[in-house]
Image (cartoon, grey):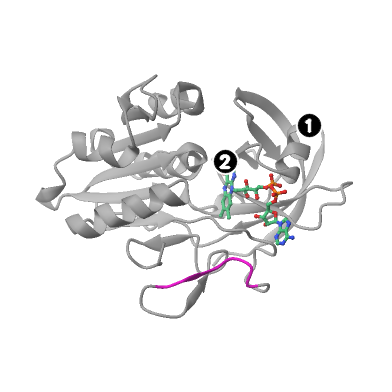
Amino acid sequence: MSKIVVENVKIIKKKSLGRGNFIFEMAPFSKTKSIKPGQFVHIRQPRTNLLFRRAFSVYDFDAANRTLSIIFKVFGRGTSLMAKLERGAALDVMGPLGNGFKYPSKRKTVILAAGGIGMPPLYLLAKTLLSRGYDPDRILYFYGGSSKADLVDISRIKKLGIRVYPSTDDGSYGFKGFVTDAITDNVDLTNGKHHLYGCGPEGMLKALDELALSKNLPGQLSLEAPMPCGIGICLGCIKPLRAGGYTRICREGPVYDVGEVLL
Ligand SMILES: Cc1cc2nc3c(=O)[nH]c(=O)nc-3n(C[C@H](O)[C@H](O)[C@H](O)COP(=O)(O)OP(=O)(O)OC[C@H]3O[C@@H](n4cnc5c(N)ncnc54)[C@H](O)[C@@H]3O)c2cc1C
């Protein structure tokens, strides 16, 4: 694991993406060069009485300019306060944290399955795979949400030139139904040529895990859990492993092989 730092950064860009979703671009963060897709930062908001940091996957970064971006959705108290911050406000950022994704063989077709706010780490994974020479036609990005407005920043994913498959529960955009159904509808999973990555709500991850296990499809899932400390001390984010025992999502995770964690 690369060195973890705790640094004072400033919001240099803030953009609303609608439906309570925001992008923050922040700088300067000294460890951008060592960030791997799937890693996260743990953010404390100074000048609030919030006790705990909040975890956010790294959406993008620019190592030369030491900038880092996240997308967040307003959920509870912490993210509501964060949404009120404007350009120039300071944040205390700890990271990069967690293990990140392992890269697949270049012979595989990569299926990225994102649900809602699970989109950012899979965007960064797609971008990184392209920079490592993977074929854009063999990167399939399945992005699901309740309706069209929940597929935030989809234009940025499309700009990567990979194959994007939107899906919505209400059918307002793309495939009508769940991400897992969009995958089985579009991809023949029986030929052993695919590698799956997933990030999203727990129900979706469970469905992806079951799909992958039933089709003998290798892959990794990025998990979320309430995460007070983020560095493996408080045990607030433990989950049971299929083989027995427990894992700390913040320390051994958040990325696990398909079937590894009992979802
Ligand atoms: C690895 C990881 C990556 C994530 N990536 C993203 C992302 O890219 N975008 C996004 O929108 N969301 C992401 N999340 C979820 C994000 O962290 C939650 O949306 C956020 O924590 C909700 O915070 P809140 O302040 O709005 O809610 P609140 O309900 O105020 O707080 C929830 C969090 O605060 C902490 N907390 C508060 N009170 C307690 C308590 N009494 N005991 C223990 N813990 C407490 C916990 O960490 C809990 O998860 C990620 C989560 C994880 C674990």
Residue that carries the numbered disc 1 in the rendered image: 84
Where is residue 154? Give x, y as percent.
45, 26
Q: Residue at x 18, y 38 (%)?
A: 187
Identify which amino acid the numbered label 2 is placed on. Answer: Phe
Which of the image's four quarters has the N terminus?
bottom right
Where is residue 12? Give x, y as percent.
73, 31
Q: Which region is colored magenta?
A: 235-241
Q: Residues within 10 Å of mark 2 (few under 14, many from 20)?
A: many
Which of the image's four quarters has the C terminus?
bottom left
Marker count (numbered): 2
Q: Looking at the image, which is closer to me, 130 or 115?
A: 115
Asked if the beta carbon under badge 2 is closer than 8 A to the nearest atom of ligand 1, the reply is no
Q: Which mark is residue 255?
A: none
Residue 5 shows in the view? yes
Q: Residue at x 89, y 46 (%)?
A: 47
Where is residue 176? Give x, y as percent.
32, 27
Identify which amino acid the numbered label 1 is placed on. Answer: Lys
Q: Nearer the viewer, mark 1 or mark 2?
A: 1
**Magenta segment: does it hold 157?**
no
Q: Is residue 139 left or right of residue 229?
A: left
Q: Which mark is residue 61?
A: 2
Q: Secondary structure at mark 2?
A: strand
Q: Secondary structure at mark 1?
A: loop
Mark 1–mark 2 distance (CA, rounded to whole Å): 23 Å
Residue 135 shows in the view? no
Residue that extends furthest to the front in the rendered view of this protein: 170
Q: Looking at the image, which is closer to me, 11 or 77?
A: 77
**Above or below — where is 103 with respect to 142?**
below
Q: Is residue 185 left or right of residue 50?
A: left
